[in-house]
Image: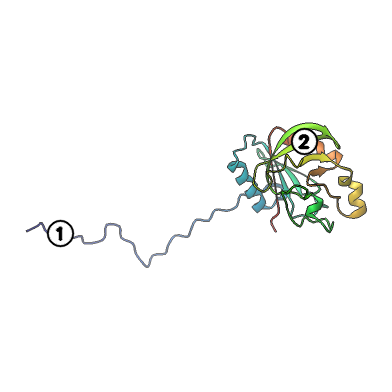
Amino acid sequence: MGLPLPVYSRPLNPVDPLAPRPAPVVYAVPQAPGGIDPQLFARAKAALNAHRIAARDFIGIADFSKPSSERRFHVVDLRNGQVESFRVAHGSGSDPRHDGYLERFSNDFGSYATSNGTYTTGDYYHGKYGLSMKTHGRDWSNNNAEPRAIVIHNAWYAEPDVLASNGKLGRSQGCFAFSRADQRPVMDKLAGGRMIYADKLA
């Protein structure tokens, strides 16, 4: 005959079925600095970590949800949250009606479209538009950036007088094209393998 089974007067870890349950933990999207869309900022921060970008002082965020008439390219100082915002042109293949809004992205050769995703900056060089900077696409959606010659440069169609005349900037062939005055501060802060994240939320 075996030993009798132990009898407990109550459960070891009693749970009152009528007791209120704790509220689920909700993790808020990090506060985005300088009016940048919080969802886009969160995507950019996630890309910074996913691609293990070494330089983490400045990043660029291009919000192509906004029209080219707005200051939609943000240079963010991650150390203190300060932001400088600039106008940037998008590719003609992304805006076939030329209404100032980016309609679609493409990574295809000959598309003349803007590509979305994570970029890092490359070398300076002198090209058609003078001093320019190469970019490297880090995602499947923009990995043709270097062979497509998607670069940072200035262009006449990104100057303020074009905006004043037409209500929008002209279009690039997929490059990040800035006015001459804006190009230099963008390149100065994002040079050396720093990240640019380009996307559209809607």
Mark 1 or mark 2, which is nearer to you?
2
- How many residues crowd around disc 1 within 10 Å: few (fewer than 14), some, or many (20 or more)? few
Q: Position of residue 94 (x, y in %)?
A: 78, 54
The answer to whether residue 23 is left or right of residue 128 is: left
Residue at (79, 53) in percent of width and height: 93
Residue at (69, 46) in percent of width and height: 142
Q: Which residue is mark 1?
A: 5
Q: Quadrant of the N terminus?
A: bottom left
Residue extending farthest to the bottom is 18
Q: Secondary structure at mark 2?
A: strand
Looking at marks 1 and 2 on the same chain, the residue that comes earlier in the sequence is marked by 1
Labelled disc at residue 188:
none
Of residues 126 and 88, which is closer to you in this image? 126
Labelled disc at residue 133:
2
Q: Position of residue 5 (x, y in %)?
A: 15, 59
Residue extending farthest to the front is 110
Q: Position of residue 192 (x, y in %)?
A: 70, 32
Of residues 151 and 140, which is closer to you in this image? 140
Residue at (66, 40) in percent of width and height: 78
The answer to whether residue 2 is left or right of residue 60 is: left
Residue type highlighted by circle 1: Leu
Q: Quadrant of the C terminus?
A: bottom right
Residue type highlighted by circle 2: Met
Q: Secondary structure at mark 1?
A: loop
Residue at (84, 34) in percent of width and height: 127
Give the total number of marks visible in the rendering. Answer: 2
Residue extending farthest to the left is 1
Q: CA distance from mark 1 to mark 2?
A: 78 Å
Question: Which quarter of the figure has residue 201?
Answer: bottom right
